[in-house]
Image (tube, coloured by chain):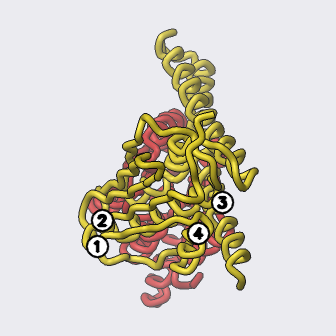
Chain colours: A red, B yellow
Amino acid sequence: MAKKKDIKVLLVDDEQAFVDTLSQRLQMRDLKVHKVYDGEQALSFVKGEEPDVMVLDLKMPGMQGMEVLKEIRKKYPKMQVIILTGHGTDKDEQEARRLGGFDFLKKPADIDTLVGRIKEAYKEKLERAMTAITFAEEGEFQTARDIMEKKDEE
Amino acid sequence: MSAEKELKSLQLRVISKILAGFSHEMRNHLAIIKETAGLTEDIIKSGGSKSKNDLLKLTGAIEEQVGKAALLCNYLGRFGHLLENPVISFNVNEALADLIALISRLAHQKRITLERDFDRQMPPIYGDPSGLLLLVFCLVEEIMTGLDRGGSIIIKTAFLNNALTITLVPKGSIVQPAEEIETCSAEAIQDLLRLLNSTISKKSETKEAMITLSQSITSRRD
């Protein structure tokens, strides 16, 4: 069974004090946490090490969260993305979910809720991988690929 | 739409943008306060080896963040009061400082900084602060859409020969606007200029804009 330490989380937010504090709290809850402070840094980070779950702000200087989400879905379909933002309009939430975001939380969020959603996101990622393996074993490679790339939900 | 309705509609759009920015900023402050308080609680509950000084640092950070949030509330409060009356005696520098504080997040997201260079001898002005602030907001937004990341806009005020001038000086690379200007149409800006009985001169190359108000706004040293 996976331990929480196995879950790799990347925090992406331009509010440095927020990211630094939240990362400490998540680490105290046995998650493996990395942090970056804008969208460009996030895309650069995932090239080297792919996290399981990205916790992403929407409004940041430079590259916006929605653009990061689009890039992640395109290039790293296995990665789960949870939006955590202070700029939470219903339209933003609909758009984030349409683009394949796992969840949409508004700041300030409850730490237990956030940890719960990270674990759920990780669990869904594993379940998807296992389902894809089952299809692949039966020779249905396209279906397996579609599941991994979340195409079944689009 | 009549000019009056157009201006009311513009006023609402600008206020909506400012309130949305305020709410975003405030949520960020609250999130930092919540996480810092939460971290303090986590440390105490875990009975870890953090010293008293470490905990005091955290409570100090909470105090600091509350201070920042309260300051932002002050800016919004003063801005709101200025819009209550159509014509009043007001301090242009203070009104602009409040506006700059409230829209600096918008600029920050475009990696643009807003700077001030205010005339310290500026007398109190008798006029319409709402129209003036709308006009400055529209022009700052217009300049921001055509200014590259890393740039800045200097907002200068001066009072000479009984005329108030506000000059917006962009610093940095001018680029083709990446997006349509969302808030203010050229017609709305013209309506505002008529309302304020003011003029504007723009330099097409540098995008510098200078508003001059000499008739509708007068200084009052009362």
**Residue under pointer 3:** B15
Q: Quadrant of residue A62?
A: bottom left
Q: Residue at x 59, y 59 (%)?
A: B216
Mark 2 to mark 3: distance in Å? Answer: 25 Å
Q: Is residue A56 above or below residue A115?
A: below
Q: Residue at x 43, y 77 (%)?
A: B179
- Label 4 element class: helix
Residue type at mark 2? Answer: Asp
Residue type at mark 3? Answer: Ile
Mark 4 to mark 1: distance in Å? Answer: 26 Å
**Residue under pointer 1:** B175
Proximity of marks 3 and 4: CB atoms separated by less than 8 Å: no
Q: Are marks 2 and 4 on the same chain?
A: yes
**Residue under pointer 2:** B148
First-in-chain label (1 vs 2):
2
Proximity of marks 1 and 2: CB atoms separated by less than 8 Å: yes
In the drawing, what numbered circle is on residue B192?
Answer: 4
Foreground: disc 3 or disc 4? 4
First-in-chain label (4 vs 1):
1
Q: Residue at x 56, y 80 (%)?
A: B187
- Label 3 element class: helix
First-in-chain label (2 vs 4):
2
